Image (spheres, grey):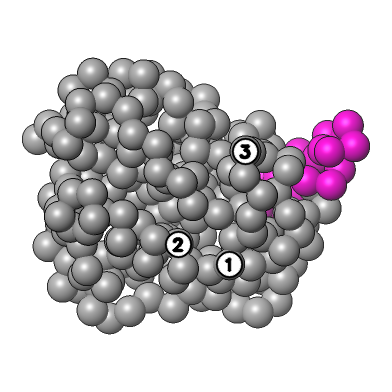
Amino acid sequence: MRFIEYGRKNKNVIVFVHGSCTTAETCYSEIIKVLRKKYCCVLCRLDGHDTNRKSDFVSIERETLKIENYVKGRFDGKILAFVGLSLGSAICVNIMSRGEVKAEKIFLDSVYCIDKGFWYAWLTYLTCYAGIFYIRNGGRVPEKITEKFFGKGNRSVTDMLYSGISSKSVKNICLDVYRYKIRANVSLCESEILCIRGGYDPVSAQSVDLLRMYLPDLKEKVIENCGHAQFLNEHVQEYILMLDDFLKK
């Protein structure tokens, strides 16, 4: 994993943790252009997702430890906010449950933190990797398949794909994310939390409901007519305004 810093050094630090099978820059480059003017923005290039370094994603726990060690060593274990998308949100939830580093605010977009079972995890892996292989060879994934897993009318998941990701990384991600078991001590997290999700994203809806059992004060924003990660990809200026408003309050 590599950490890339932008903006005002050590001033109101935000750590961005991107989604699976994409890159940090694909997810957050437009947001960084705006927020770097008043925040220190840190992009985490997760293992297996770095276009300039060959590696494999191993587990949520391993990525969590690397981010914690970076925040401890660089910022004394305290920052303004974590911002996570999909897989990145699951990593943020894992960080929240461990309590090793602190953030005043946590912004979770399309969070997945619920155990969907062995067969769902494997089916998702096979579908995702088949789609990536198909795109590598110039194909286009049928909309019926993407909508089945990621929401009605949602092309964002395929638009944001990093086709260089390995089969091993995709398998490890799916088997970790879709079998994630939340720790009860996530309830000890004292950060202000905002969960946003598309109205067509049922796994994120289930995940937010589960999180609320442990963190009843978390806030939720449902983006109508959007699926998984679609709001970030298709409405980036509105996304920036929402995130900046949350960070300022």
Residue 63 is labelled as 2
Q: Answer left or right for 208 relative to 13.
A: right
Q: Are marks 3 and 1 in contact (CB under 8 Å)?
A: no
Q: Residue at x 25, y 40 (%)?
A: 14
Q: Which residue is mark 3?
A: 52
Q: Residue at x 70, y 76 (%)?
A: 119
Q: Answer left or right for 124 relative to 1.
A: right
**Could you tell me if residue 197 is visible in this image?**
no
Q: Which residue is mark 1?
A: 58
Measuring from the top left, give residue 37's x and y in whole percent. 23, 18
Note whether 237 is above or below 200 in the view shown: above
**Mark positioned earlier in the residue sequence (3 or 1):** 3
Note whether 244 is above or below 191 in the view shown: above
Q: Residue at x 66, y 32 (%)?
A: 159
Measuring from the top left, give residue 66's x and y in whole percent. 39, 61
Q: Residues within 10 Å of mark 3 (few under 14, many from 20)?
A: few
Measuring from the top left, give residue 148's x and y in whole percent. 69, 51
Q: Amino acid at mark 1?
A: Val
